[in-house]
Every structure is written in C-alpha cells, then in structure tokens.
Image (tube, rainbow, N blue to C red):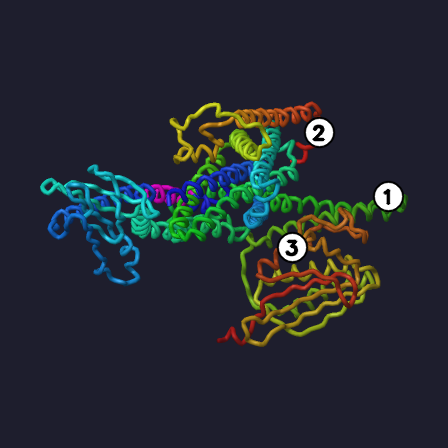
Amino acid sequence: MTSIRLFLTLTLIAIIVMVSFLSSLRGYRESMLEAENLFDLQLLEHVKLLSLLNPELSSAGYARVVEELLLPQQSDLALSAEMRIAYQVFDPNGALVLRSVLAPVTQMTPFEVGYRDVNFNGYRWRVLAIRDPEQQHWLMAAQRYDLRYELAERVILEAVVPTLLSIPLAALLIWFIVGYGLRPIRVLAREVRSREASDLSNVQLEGIPKELTPLTQSTNDLLRRLQSSFGREKRFAADAAHELRTPISTLKVQIHNLQAELADSATNAEAIASAADLHKGIDAMGHLVEQILVLNRTAPDQYMVQFVPVDVFELVREVVSAEYEQILQRDQNFELEGASAVVKGDATALRSLVVNVLTNASKYTPSGGSILMRVERIGKSASADAQVQLQIEDSGPGIPEAFYERVFDRFYRLDGDRHSSGVSGSGLGLAIVKHIVEMHGAQIALSSSERLGGLCITITLRAFDTDSRNQ
Amino acid sequence: MTSALIIVLREVLEAVLIICMLLASSSALGLRFRWLPPALFAGLTGALIYALSLEDISMAFEGFGQEIVNAVILLLIMLLLLAHNFLAMREFKAPKIARLPALSLLVLSATIAMAMVREGSEIYLYVYSYGVVAGDMTSVLAGGAIGTGIGFSLGTFIYYGLRTLSARHCLLFSSIMALVIGAGMSSQAALFLAQADLVPTSEPLWDSSALVAESSLLGELLQAVIGYEASPIATQVVMFAGALLLSLAAMGIGIFSVRNISANPGAIRTHRSNE
C-alpha cells in the first residue's frame, strides 16, 4: 500500500461498483422476467377482447382480415408500433374466420390451450391459444419474441445506464473526499517540515483528528528527547570551552616565562625553537577554544538577538584597522571599496562575521597576494527589497565548487587537518559565519573571484533605511 | 445485455487476474510500476492489430490461422507464467538476495502485453460484431461496462488482498494463481489445436455440464480462472496436467537455484554488505 488515498479510492469504488453492478444485474434479470409476464398478460387481455367480438361478423368459409388503421405514424412509437399483436379466430370446426394482417392464413399454433413459442413469418413468436367456453371458438394472439425482448431491455436499460454513468462521478467525489479526509496528515507533515531546525517545541494543531493523536504524541515525545540531548551536547561544548580558557591562559603565562628564562640562559637554541613552537600551539588551542565559544554563542537558538542599525562599511573599516597587522605581516595588498550601508543586526555578531571572513581570506591568500572587500547597497532607497552586499575576494587557491556546501560544516577543512596552503585553522570560521548569516535572515554564496582568481564570498543582508525608521 | 456482460466479464477477468497478480508480484520483487504503462500500451496496440487483421489470420494455415495463433498466444502466456513462478520462488527462498531485475521486468511486461493482446482482441471483436454490426450498441456497452466494472473490482480486491500479505506469502499465492491460470490456458490452447487438427481429438472424457454449465455465470468465471471445460477431451486434460507439472518444476528449480547460491557464502555476504 504505497498511497492511502489511492487505496481508499480504489477499494471504495470497487465495493460500490461490485454492489451496484451486481444489484443492477439482478434488477435487470428480475425486470426482464417481469416484462415477460406483462407481455404475456397483454396477450391474454387481447384474447379476452377477441372473445367479445360478435361471431356473426364472420361467416364460415370466409376469413375476414382486419386492417391496421388506427396506428399513429410517429417515429417515437416505431418500436411500439411493431409490437402489434397478430391474432386469429377459428370457428368450432377449426376454420379461420378472422385474422389480423400480421397473422398467417394457417393456424399459428396447434389447438391447445396455453402459451407456446413458435416460428412463422421468419421470426420466433410467443403465442397464446384459448378456446371460448361459450361459443367454442379458438382465439389466438401472438407477439414477436425479439421485439418483446428489445422493448423490455430498452426500458430496463433506461434504469441501468444512469447507475453506470454515475460511477465516474462517484469515483471523482471519493477521490476528493478521501483527499480532504487525509488533509490533517498533510497539515501535520507541513507543520513539522516547515519548522526551523532549532525549533523543537511541541507540535500543536487545532482540531487534530483522534486517529492522528498517537502520532502527534509520539512526535512530541521524540522532539522532547531530541531537545534535551541537543541541550546536553551544547552545554557540554560551551562548558568545556569555557573551562579550558583558564588552564590555557595559565599555560600561556608559563610558556612566556619559560621563553624568557631560556632567552636569558641562551644555552640551547633547539630548546628555544621548541618553546616557540609550543607557544604557537598554545595560541592555536586558545583560538580554537574562543571559536567554539563564539560558535555556540552565535547559534541561532542560543543567541539573544538584539538588532540595532549597523553601518556595515564602518564596521568593515574598524575590523580592518584592528586586523591590519596580520595583513601587513603577510605583505598582502588590501583594498576596500564601497560606501556607507546600514543594516539592522547584532553589532557583536556582525563584527565576528567580518573578522572571520577577513582573517579567512588573509590566512589563505599567499604573501604578496591581494584581498578586495566591497560593501554596496543594491535596490532603490526606501524600497522593501533594498539589500546590502558584502563581498570579499582574494587571490588565494579558492575552493572547488563541489565543496561549497561542506566548508560551512563545523570542523570541516578542505584536504583534512592541514590545508594545502599549509595554513592551520580551527575549521570553525565559516560555520560561525553561516550561523550569523542565518541569524540575520541573510544569504551567503561562494563563487570564484573573477578579478583576483581566488575565493569570492558574497553576503547579502536586508538593508535598513534610516528614513523609513522615522516613519 | 447478459451475454455481453458474461463474455466481457470473462475476458476482463482473465486479463485482470493476470495483471493484478503480476502487479502484486512486481512490488514483492522490489520493482516499481514504471513498466506497466508501456506494457499495457504494447498489449492494446497488439490487440487492435490482431483484431483488425483477423480476416487474413483466419485464412492462413488452411483456414486454421486464428486457432493456431490463439493457441500460440495462450502457450506463450503459459510459458511466461512459468518464468514468473521461477523468479517468484527465487525471491521466496532468498528475499532480496537472488533478484534478477532485468529478467523480471521482461517477464512481467511480456506476460501483461500478451494477455492484453488475447483478451483485448476478443473484447474488441465482440463489441464490434454485436454492437456496431448488429446495431445493439447500448445493450453491448451496458453489459460490457458492468462486466468490466465487476472484473476491475475483483482485480482491485485481489491486488490489495495479495499486498496485505508479506512479500514472501504474496509471491507464494501469486505463483499458485499463475500455476492454475497457466494450466487453464494450456487446456484452452489444446482445444484450439484440436480444432486445427494439430493434436488428436477424442470423445469427451466426462461431462460435468449438469453440475456447472459452461454458459452459466459460474461456468464462465471458472473458465476465466482455471480454463473450465464441462466436457474436455483427453488432450486438454493431458496439457492441463502437463502445465501444472511444468509450473511446479519451474518453482522447484527456482528454489533449487537459490540453494546453490546459498552454498556459496561469499556471494551472499557480498550482497548483504550492500544492504
């Protein structure tokens, strides 16, 4: 059973067809028998009328032929007109004294009382023969069998055909009614499907049919279990990162002291180099822990959103000033284009976003390479669909298109732990960026930079109009 | 109308039984129904071509063309049902392990197309000769519609009835149905071949028309399902029994062929690891 709707429609139609067709069939057979009786009765009545005729009208040795004069010519009575009765009257000696045009000159049936099926004039006839008890005349009346059958069937089919024609209509109605009846399932599915990934609250639908209540309850149970295990996972990551901060700070102080002592003694150059590596490692670990904390704080379901107007261009300038030392160290050429463009967002989160895309570009652009940042407003001022586009391009190795989706995964790094560029990182930068983009209902797209040849990240945010704010 | 109903119902029922049984088998064999529309279309086209060229066919083989072609079609369907039983029993013995999807598709499509050719052409000829030529269209159409409706209703019940069973039991029941239907077709083919003087004709072995008359509704239904004949000749009985034995043999070979696969554990492990 792949579709409940199809199953219900087909089986219901099959039941209706079976019941109504079988009853139609039975009705047809019964009606045909009844029609036979009626026609036989008609013959009997006809013979009764014949018995009332004055026998003096006919004289022995001369058979009077009664012409058919009274028949209407209307076409709609054509079959009824053909249903004329052939009749014969014989005197007590067996001589034909009266007959209709249709009747043969010879007797239609032997002189035996009762109904009989006989052939004459090229057709099969139903004949009734009766002897008048007073005058001892033989009275015979006959009807063509094929016409009796045809007329009876025509009348009965008038009743059967509407039943047949109503089946497609019933099928259509059943299809729609079953679809309507199954609508709560679709509503429930849509409600679950349309939820935000972070929304694990109970499914609550009004007027849910009792058949779906167990399903809703199980879904809600599942959501509760999921929510609690997600909560545990998040708390663990955040708590662990937070708890790691203190020992890392202590380690940083101790390695600083160790380096100072080693520099003073100047005894072992290798030990100094190892201490420097250790320092780098501790810094990287510290950065990773900080990134995990940022990632958790910016998760859409964790973040306490406080949106205020933020000038993205200004923000980028501030971040560039703060991070310029890193760019200078790597001898990279940095360029910022654009003009003031305001969005409504969380200032801290947006700063984190810009820091991450900028440090990411700087990290993967080789020394002497170029980085270009552009902030521009798209769309008419005060229009509802005005947008602010933040674009950052670099002359680094870029990312193959097949990996565009995966680089946003947490801890995912192209080519594993160590990028082919030789740069180490936490693998959380773009995951944080994605969180912040989602939090702002913005879009992020990766492409290949046409100008610089490396990666191009385009973030599109909804513009905030300072004029409309005052309206 | 009653005669139209009985004739159409008999033909529709034969086709519907085969189609519904094979559809149920198809899903039990893990196949989708995409093969059905092309098979039905091919069958209907074949039926139309057969019906329209019946005059030429009848004249062939010294006037026995129609009997011979009918017998060939019936025997082909019987052989395809044998193949179905072989495939169904492989699946019954080792579900999902020993599937032959390409062969299954071919067998199912060909069986339905052949059944449509046979039953479709008969219905067309009946409706044409009694409805169009004899001018009794309303009666023939009404009878035909009632027969078709009852046939399709029975088909729906059979299909969903089989689908309520587990895949293995569905295949087992389908195979038993195919066994009986195939034997019935083989017996009908024997009658056609006897009419064409290609197999020996004898006096009827028995006459059960007093018990179930061929022209009665039950007789017609039995003819549709098991090829019932009130007074069969010896050849019919022999071919009926022969088809039953062949079908049982095909089922046995199906089960045995999977046993051979089971004897080679490597083959099964490979398949299971893919699941």
Please give the name of the residue rendered at 82% of the width and 61% of the height, measured from the top-left corner: A330
Farthest front residue? A61
Under mark 1, the amino acid is: Ala
Which residue was labeled with disc 1? A271
Which percent across, then down, holds residue A156?
A: 30, 49
**Tag 2 residue:** B267
In this view, the residue in front, B70 or A254, is B70
Residue picked out by circle 3:
A432
* Residue A22 part of the magenta segment: yes
Q: CA distance from mark 2 to mark 1?
A: 60 Å
Neighbours of disc 2 within 10 Å: few (<14), some (14-19), many (20+): few
Q: Main secondary structure of the magenta part?
A: helix
The disc numbered 3 marks a residue on which chain? A
Chain of the residue on which disc 2 is drawn: B
- SS class, disc 1: helix
Residue span colored magenta: A11-23
For the residue marked with disc 3, what is the amino acid? Ile
Q: Secondary structure at mark 3?
A: helix
Q: Amino acid at mark 2?
A: Ala
Q: Are marks 2 and 1 in contact (CB under 8 Å)?
A: no
A406 on left or right of A148: right
